[in-house]
Image: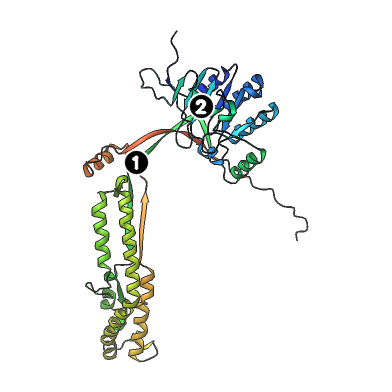
Amino acid sequence: MNSPAALTVANDQAIIEMIRSAKERLIIMAPGVSEPVAAAIEERWRNLGPAAVTVILDVDPEVCRMGYGTLRALEMLREVASNQGGLVNNHPGIRIGLVIADGETLIYTPTPLLIEASPTPAQPQEQPKPNAIRIGLPPESLQRDLGIGPDGARERMVGLDGVTKEQTDSVSKNLAENPPQKFDVARSVRVFNAQFEFVEIEIKGAALQRKTVRLPNYLLGLEENTVLDQAMRATFRVVDRDSPVSGARLERHRQRIIRRYLHHLPGYGFIVLRRDKEKLVQALDYLRWAVESFRLRLASELQVSLDAKRKALAEVLEARITQRPNERRRLFLGTPKEIVEHELHRLFGSASDLIDAIQLRVVYKAVTYESLVDPKFVALVRDRVPALERLHEETTVARAIPMPPARTPPPTSMKGAA
């Protein structure tokens, strides 16, 4: 008769079968357990008695949020332990699983259902995917750590504290305030992790060399509703292209970052490889500092530049409307100089208005699975980024069960309403 394989799969079904095989002694150590596993432990506890069963868990709400176990399973075990005169023991930070049933030992990796689905035995012609080792009697050193060696509990190192009702109540309260997701372990879903993501980098408002204002035609001495008036649109550049406050240096800095860290996919946008993202973030931190430094410098220089530009333009326009007054100009009170200054202040705005609009905008967008399996998209990425060996990785996780919508409270009494 062949003995069971040492490398094996430990899921709820396998753990329950091993628990039920215990006839003399049962030891369970894990971050947490599911309700079916808790039910199997409960049945053995009632049959074997309190002295024959040891349960060690990590009593922490994060265990439930990660999907290692459930609050209900913990409450079931604490209740049966109390009824049997035993204890559920607590050991913070446990992240390995252990089942000892008589002379058999199973050491396994617990599955966090938040991240991946519970393992299943390999199908025929599939490579096995073990997460556990099954051996006979536990080594003497392990027996000592668990308190089942020759000196008993005196050498025990784990699970030294019993779980109290106050602890379970605290976990219950914490999970009520921040509930874990519910996982359907009977169903799984494939999830993917792309090797890149889309990114948009924009410096808004800093291209002051492009800032123009449209001059009303009446300031140019043109009559309204004429062919020339309707066809002519005069604009004025507020900041010269080569001005030190133009923001052109910031744009060149942005372009350097794009060339160094991003790849362009025509028709889709720019992507950053995940292996380059940390360097990109550092470069963007420096660019963000450069933008803020530019804003601070503008605060003292831009208004001076705007005032000089406005003054030079005002002299030209004042002479223009003085020489060629029109009907629109007569609607305004004041001298030509006052009219021009009022209009240009309105059109130019203030330096603070322009400075407030300057900001670095960075948006990351995930790539969709549909794109990753689209042959045209895949071919484009491989053409533009030939060094990328694979576009994404896939894994299986337990499907989260959507939370039911919150109940609408019943209407309050209308007694006394007008």
Give the SS element for disc 1.
strand
Q: Nearer the viewer, residue 173 or 244?
A: 173
Give the SS element for disc 2.
strand
- At 44% from the left edge and 12% from the top edge, which residue is drawn? 3
**Outermost residue, top direction?**
1
- At 29% from the left edge and 48% from the top edge, which residue is drawn? 276
Q: Nearer the viewer, residue 13 or 160?
A: 160
**Outermost residue, right direction?**
416
Q: Which residue is mark 1?
A: 194
Picture coordinates of residue 254, whole percent (x, y): 27, 60
Picture coordinates of residue 27, whole percent (x, y): 56, 25
- Looking at the rendered image, the quarter that the C terminus falls into is bottom right
Q: Which residue is mark 2?
A: 98
Q: Quadrant of residue 417?
A: bottom right
Indicate the amino acid at tag 2. Answer: Leu
- Comparing labels 1 and 2, the label whose residue is closer to the camera: 2
Against 152, residue 262 (above or below) is below
Picture coordinates of residue 118, whole percent (x, y): 47, 29
- At 34% from the left edge and 70% from the top edge, which residue is drawn? 295
